[in-house]
Image: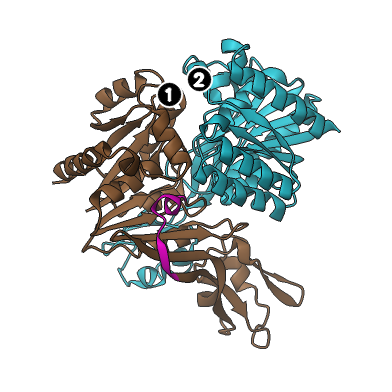
Amino acid sequence: MKELIVISGKGGTGKTSLMGAFASLAENKILCDADVDAADLHLIVDPTVVQRTDFQSGNTAKINRQQCTECGTCRDLCRWDAISEEFVVNSISCEGCGVCVYFCPEKAIDFPVNTCGEWFISETRFGPMVHARLGIAEENSGKLVTLVRQQASLLAKEKKMDLIMTDGPPGVGCPVIASIGGASAVLVVTEPTVSGSHDMERVVELAAYFKVPAMICVNKFDLNPELTRDIEAYAARKGLPSLGRVPFDPAITRAMVQGKTIFEFDGQSEAAKAIRGIWQRLSEKLYK
Amino acid sequence: MIVSIASGKGGTGKTTVATNLAFAMGSGVQLLDCDVEEPNAHLFIRPVFEHTQTITSPVPDVDMDKCTLCGKCGEICQFKAIVVIAETVLPFEELCHGCGGCMAVCPENAITEKGRELGVLQKGHRNGIEFIHGKLRVGEAMSPPLIKEVLACIDPAQETIIDAPPGTSCPVIESMKPADFVLLVTEPTPFGLHDLKLAVGAVRILGIPCGLVINRSDLGDDKVKDYADEMNLPILMEIPFDRKIAEAYSRGEAIVDVMPEWKERFLKLHEKIKGLVN
């Protein structure tokens, strides 16, 4: 079984639009959205939720005011400035380290488990999908990503699918690290802008750090053809395959507005033709 | 006044708005780039960096001569970052949140702290703008402590602009917390709207006033505006799609430099924000 993760470093380069397009083209696959913080793939593939499960992770301190003697031990020990002078815990600042709970001489601090999101198994017109939603302002996104990937893998085995296609989060931090570890390959979708190229280099470095093979493609390449060539030259120096270029095409935005993939919207558009080529080269690389 | 610029969805134009606002306002402004995973503002500001400092997070350093293998450190740790195995204590530095619990609980005082490198903080200047950003070490997962260090540089004597990371989880919340106003940059697409709603949810939890900038305002539909009406969110600026802007951005050039008429518009944006805060 192969697991492909689509990432970008910089947000807004077109990861999810490309993922939707690939979903139209690939067969026998599970879709997976690992951007649990601001998931968007469902807006294109319109999943029908089959199974919904709470995601519980971490704890938050809660001071029982009846038992509290205001001795101040918790405030002295807390490194997150999460306890006010009135001895109320700010749940957003609380890291869930439990140090205050352990040291409270009155045992006046509860430490309930957080429900910080939910995850889903769904059906879509492109096949099964595993996705999730992290609660707003919640922590533990990396753990939810890991959970979603594990569930996608179990589902793929159960349904005898040979490919998991995962829409990854932006950045290079905790959720991205959780998304790419142990994957078969990552596809880095970049754009020819100084920021797109800067962020692409960092995410390529990250993939190398975790020893995951990386490939690149350049979206909106015609906004800056010179920088597109520089990006491809960088990839060549690093020994990474460049799978192709997608032109800036308003059809991509129009397709998104209608909740369609580019192939459902206009299979003859310039962007659609380019993405089909990228998909062909991508599948050759995956299954070679 | 501290203005934090956030979005939910990545790539909507946070950095464009943050950097152009800073350039339009000029001296007396500090710009803090808190997207430490993928900092970009420096590519547009192009500051001369005068100061670089390594940022660390505290992790336990166990003195095995004092340790009696009692196991209390492993018991208190919520992050499985320190365990007693057979005849030794194993700290897993990458899992450690730096709460100091193991050090506080150790009855033998066998634990002290040392620093683990998270990344660097850099400070510089350009055209009277003070510029500060953090750069997370590639391979490092923990960004909030680095963001906190960047935010510790807030200078109340100046106007502060914070470029926040995308999303709505802990790093974003950190970058919004100190703000007097959150400016949400969005685009009129289903992805833009969906992630805007999440961002508005985060801002409302924090109870900070906010307003919108709609970028590429003519590429998409009207649903972001309908939502803004419904939620009573002021639309403070619209930036239409213009290939000239997109190409200038691709080269790392500011809109206010390429199209000087935008300087007034960004200054007006700042005036509107000031009006809403007071």
Tags 2 and 1 touching, CB below 8 Å: yes
Residue type for callout 2? Met
Apparent side of residue B219 relative to residue B203 in the rendered image (left or right): right
In the image, is B238 to the left or to the right of B142? left
Looking at the image, which is closer to me, A156 or B174?
B174
Residue extent of the magenta highlight? B40-51
The dot on residue B189 is 1
Q: Is residue B227 magenta?
A: no
Q: Specify the subunit that label 1 lies on.
A: B
Image position, residue B51 (x, y; %)? 43, 71
Chain displayed in cyan: A
Q: Give the answer, above or below, for where A96 lies relative to B275.
A: below
Task: Pinpoint residue A279: horizontal percent, then vertical percent.
Answer: 72, 25
Residue A4: mark: none
Q: Residue furthest bottom?
A: B65
In the image, residue B42 lies in the stretch drawn in magenta: yes
Tell me the quarter of the picture where residue B201 sits. Answer: top left
Residue position marked by numbered label 2 in the rendering: A256
